[in-house]
Image (cartoon, grey):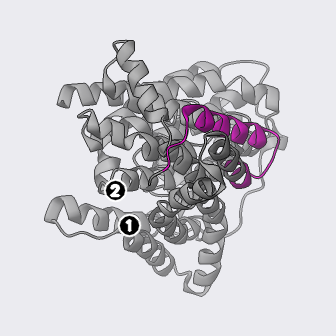
């Protein structure tokens, strides 16, 4: 007989996990311990709780495999200098007069082609700081441009969060990526407007000591740098265009291999894969931990209770999608973990309520970018560190980042309403 946990148990488990993560417990362990305690409080007993946790983690395995292989592409783009070359080319073409726009667009594209959002910001940061120092931009404006651009790129990328959401709804990855193109464009526009507003702020200057020494390594030309991402885009596009299904498990590593071959770094292939694995291993482990708490929440009465609450408030069922993404991402301070928990937990109720799978996935995905960069997550600290910003100054950017994410979420909902 299937065990159902109480809503109280699911909520307590999630709260415990959040507290543990805030207290600097390794996030995967925090999520696992929160799931265990929540399951016990929720009335599942030790055996039932462990079974639900294992089942929840098991649902993540296909996503974990795809994420692990995506590390080959990410590692190749970074180690060969392809990502840096793409960013530099975009900035050069747009020009320093449009510095904020060029920084945001560069980060968006780097993230959209398969580099994780935090790595995208770290990759673009040295270029952005150099441009910002010459143009007299503030550090806050430059960082917001990168983060906002990354958020826009993240919802249309073959990154772990997109993979996890598409897996939860059993959708084609390319379809989920394409669905949020319009929301991504709006998020980019809002990013440029807000970052331009902050860029002229005084008291937050970029100084010479913030600039890194130029890298002497020879970068590939732009065509070489773009070969890997183009390979991935073409392979993933074969399904909607010609009904030829190339799984991301194949397309993403192939793009990485093409990148290494074309840029002439064949001898560094193993080094690229090892570097890429080091970058995705943490995400893969986090997803396993996320799966355990998702297993408890999914087997609890929380789904029914939340749906009932929305009905009592006379709110339409589709509101559950963006709301779930926002709340779960805030709880985990992670786009990937938040969108995964939300999709795993509420896919059933949303589909039962008649919300199309693709629309629900897109709204959850967009919603998970609203308040995903809180201080109990690594993204907050990694991005602040990329421009040598102190925690207090970094905290002040959170409302602006939330506006960017909220923009893509609102537009994603509008797209659903228009197409419904």
On the image, numbered disc 2 is attached to which residue?
A: 173
Please name whichever residue, 83 or 245, is drawn nearer the observer in this view of the structure: 245
On the image, numbered disc 1 is attached to which residue?
A: 248
Mark 2 or mark 1, which has the lower sequence index? 2
Determine the main secondary structure of the stretch shown in magenta: helix
Taking the image as shown, residue 411 lies to the left or right of residue 108, namely left
- Segment colored magenta: 3-31
Q: Is residue 369 above or below residue 299?
A: above
Instruction: Please tell me how crowded label 2 is: few (under 14), some (14-19), or many (20+) other residues with Cα within 10 Å.
Output: many
Residue 40 falls inside the magenta stretch: no
Q: Residue at x 49, y 69 (%)?
A: 65
Taking the image as shown, residue 44 lies to the left or right of residue 184, namely right
In the rendered structure, are the residues bearing label 2 and label 1 in contact, judged by CB atoms less than 8 Å apart?
A: yes
Residue 21 falls inside the magenta stretch: yes
Q: Position of residue 247 (x, y in %)?
A: 33, 69
Q: Position of residue 277 (x, y in %)?
A: 62, 70
Quarter of the image holding residue 417? top left
Asked whether the viewer can see residue 150, the reply is: yes
The quadrant of the picture occupied by the N terminus is bottom left
Q: For the residue labelled by badge 2, is the local secondary structure a helix, a strand or a loop?
A: helix
């Amino acid at each position: 007989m299937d065990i159902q946990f109480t809503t109280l148990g699911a909520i307590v488990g999630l709260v415990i996990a959040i507290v543990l993560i805030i207290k600097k417990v390794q996030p995967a362990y925090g999520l696992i311990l929160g799931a265990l305690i929540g399951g016990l409080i929720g009335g599942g007993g030790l055996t039932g709780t462990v079974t639900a946790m294992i089942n929840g983690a098991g649902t993540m395995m296909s996503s974990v495999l795809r994420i692990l292989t995506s590390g080959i592409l990410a590692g190749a783009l970074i180690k060969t200098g392809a990502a840096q070359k793409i960013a530099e080319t975009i900035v050069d073409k747009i020009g320093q007069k449009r510095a904020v726009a060029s920084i945001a667009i560069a980060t968006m594209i780097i993230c959209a082609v398969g580099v994780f959002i935090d790595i995208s910001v770290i990759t673009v940061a040295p270029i952005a700081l150099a441009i910002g120092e010459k143009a007299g931009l503030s550090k806050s404006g430059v960082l917001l441009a990168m983060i906002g651009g990354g958020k826009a790129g993240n919802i249309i990328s073959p990154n772990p969060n997109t993979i996890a959401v598409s897996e939860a709804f059993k959708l084609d990855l390319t379809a989920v990526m394409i669905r949020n193109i319009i929301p991504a464009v709006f998020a980019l526009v809002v990013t440029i407007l807000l970052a331009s507003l902050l860029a002229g702020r005084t008291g937050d200057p970029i100084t010479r000591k913030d600039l890194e020494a130029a890298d002497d390594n020879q970068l590939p030309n732009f065509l070489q740098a773009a070969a890997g991402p183009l390979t991935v885009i073409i392979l993933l596009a074969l399904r909607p265009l010609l009904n030829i299904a190339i799984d991301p498990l194949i397309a993403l590593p192939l793009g990485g291999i093409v990148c290494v071959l074309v840029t002439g770094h064949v001898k560094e292939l193993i080094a690229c894969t090892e570097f890429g694995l080091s970058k995705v291993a943490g995400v893969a482990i986090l997803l396993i931990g996320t799966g355990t708490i998702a297993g408890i929440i999914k087997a609890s009465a929380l789904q029914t209770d939340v749906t009932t609450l929305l009905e009592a408030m006379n709110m339409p069922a589709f509101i559950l999608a963006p709301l779930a993404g926002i709340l779960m991402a805030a709880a985990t301070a992670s786009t990937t973990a938040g969108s995964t928990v939300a999709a795993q937990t509420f896919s059933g109720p949303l589909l039962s309520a008649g919300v199309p799978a693709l629309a629900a996935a897109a709204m959850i995905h967009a919603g998970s970018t609203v308040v995903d960069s809180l201080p109990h997550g690594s993204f907050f600290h990694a991005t602040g560190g990329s421009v040598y910003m102190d925690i207090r100054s970094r905290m002040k950017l959170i409302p602006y980042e939330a506006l960017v994410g909220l923009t893509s979420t609102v537009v994603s909902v509008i797209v659903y309403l228009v197409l419904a």
